């Protein structure tokens, strides 16, 4: 099973990012990530911070620099695909230790030495919404008089179209998702808590090659299943309840998920009707996806289809969001989306419907091709009632 992106592809990404920096008329691009929203920094360096945050500086000229917190040097040197590494106080953990005995670098030094000593007068920032004010203010103070601009579009554009190696990693990760879901369906029983079922899924994920969960595992039962975003708890799963399963495994930094609604016992008539229609709308969505189709049209088709069949009151959002290193990443498919679908874009087809008593999510991944949508998994496209 493929578990990582080759080193040469990281170098290609770094070169492409530097080209974008020059095309935008920037002196440098500062990319920011943290442990949860890790994708931009890991995309360029394969470094995934823990406790601390991290950055990558791409100058207009010269080699990239990985910026880390004071405690992570040995960890970073063992994992980073960027050779030059600098420790910056402002990437420390949120407890804000002073580290009086650790030698650190400063933003003033890093920016001043960039571009063969010419420095930085126009800086782009990617990871704008993830960057805390403490880091932004330190950057601002280190560059008095410089222009600082939002430049997330550079990284979004690079990550939007997946390479052959990224597709392979997504396929491998989806297979782990399938195996973990199979394990849950074989072992789940009434009386188990939601968290006990999470334990079954996690054990299977790691046994089959996952490096982490793609997101907190969803085992949401009864009224909890109506949560579009939620966390499992100590609630016991009862017979006849709908359970929202969403099981995602991260492999080599890529984070897909499979969602399937299940019932321990027989579904009620209302429950089965909504679950069945959700699957119908889920399948229909993939039929509208094809290279060249406006993304917004897929969303319009989805909302028209659901409302036209009398299920509009159960809608919250839809129908797809980007898939890659983060399980939910840009671009979304919304009725306001203006971009065309392009080959090797990847999406989670995410069909969520809910009412006050329960909710359901059908979810799988798809790659856009010239001929249509290539699904990463079709293993659980069925009504699941476990006796």
Image (tube, rainbow, N blue to C red):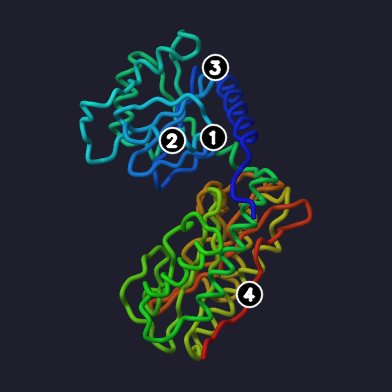
Q: Position of residue 87 (x, y in %)?
A: 36, 27
Disc 1, SS: helix
Please say if 9 is above or below 2. Answer: above
Q: Which mark is residue 185?
A: none
CA distance for labels 4 and 1: 36 Å
* Of the pair 99 and 40, the residue shown nearer to us: 99
* Of the pair 381 and 107, the residue shown nearer to us: 107
Q: Which mark is residue 62?
A: 3
Question: Disc 4 designates what residue?
Answer: 381
Q: Position of residue 191 (x, y in %)?
A: 37, 85
Question: Disc 1 designates what residue?
Answer: 44
* Of the pair 207 and 24, the residue shown nearer to us: 207
Disc 2, SS: helix
CA distance for labels 1 and 3: 15 Å
Who comes first in sequence, dot 4 or dot 1? 1
Foreground mark, 2 or 3?
2
Foreground mark, 3 or 4?
3
Q: Position of residue 98 (x, y in %)?
A: 20, 30
CA distance for labels 4 and 2: 41 Å
Disc 3, SS: loop
**For the view shown, which residue lies furthest in the right direction?**
371
Who comes first in sequence, dot 1 or dot 3? 1
- Report if residue 336 is visible in the image: no
Q: Position of residue 90 (x, y in %)?
A: 30, 30
Foreground mark, 1 or 2?
2
Who comes first in sequence, dot 4 or dot 2? 2
Query: Residue at point 30% right, 35% down?
Result: 92
CA distance for labels 1 and 2: 13 Å
Question: Disc 2 designates what residue?
Answer: 76
Q: Residues within 10 Å of mark 1 (few under 14, many from 20)?
A: many
Who comes first in sequence, dot 3 or dot 4? 3
């Amino acid at each position: 099973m493929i578990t990582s992106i080759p080193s040469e592809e990281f170098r290609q990404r770094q070169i492409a990012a530097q080209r974008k920096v020059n095309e935008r008329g920037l002196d440098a691009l500062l990319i920011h990530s943290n442990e949860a929203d890790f994708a931009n920094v890991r995309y360029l360096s394969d470094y995934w911070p823990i406790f601390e945050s991290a950055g990558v500086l791409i100058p207009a000229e010269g080699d990239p620099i990985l910026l880390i917190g004071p405690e992570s040097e040995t960890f970073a040197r063992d994992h980073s695909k960027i050779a030059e590494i600098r420790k910056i106080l402002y990437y420390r953990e949120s407890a804000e230790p002073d580290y009086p005995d650790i030698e650190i670098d400063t933003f003033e030094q890093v920016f001043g030495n960039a571009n063969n000593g010419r420095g930085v007068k126009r800086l782009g920032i990617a990871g704008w919404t993830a960057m805390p004010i403490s880091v932004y203010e330190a950057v601002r103070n280190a560059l008095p008089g410089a222009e600082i601009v939002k430049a997330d579009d550079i990284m979004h554009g690079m990550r939007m179209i997946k390479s052959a190696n990224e597709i392979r990693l997504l396929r491998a990760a989806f297979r782990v998702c399938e195996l973990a879901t199979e394990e849950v369906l074989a072992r789940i029983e009434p009386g188990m808590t939601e968290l006990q079922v999470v334990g079954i899924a996690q054990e299977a994920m790691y046994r089959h090659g996952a490096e982490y969960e793609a997101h907190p595992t969803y085992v949401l039962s009864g009224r909890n299943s109506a949560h579009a975003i939620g966390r499992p708890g100590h609630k016991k799963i009862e017979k006849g309840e709908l359970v929202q399963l969403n099981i995602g495994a991260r492999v080599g930094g890529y984070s897909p998920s499979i969602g399937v609604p299940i019932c321990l016992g027989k579904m009620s008539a209302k429950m089965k009707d909504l679950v069945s229609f959700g699957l119908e709308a889920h399948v229909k969505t993939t039929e509208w996806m094809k290279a060249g189709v406006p993304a917004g049209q897929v969303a319009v088709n989805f909302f028209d289809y659901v409302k036209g069949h009398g299920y509009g009151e159960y809608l919250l959002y839809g129908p797809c969001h980007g898939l890659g290193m983060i399980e939910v990443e840009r671009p979304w498919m919304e009725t306001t989306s203006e971009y065309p679908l392009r080959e090797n874009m990847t999406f989670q087809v995410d069909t969520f419907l809910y009412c006050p008593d329960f909710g359901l999510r059908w979810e799988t991944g798809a790659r856009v091709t010239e001929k249509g949508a290539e699904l990463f998994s079709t293993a659980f496209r069925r009504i699941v009632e476990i006796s």
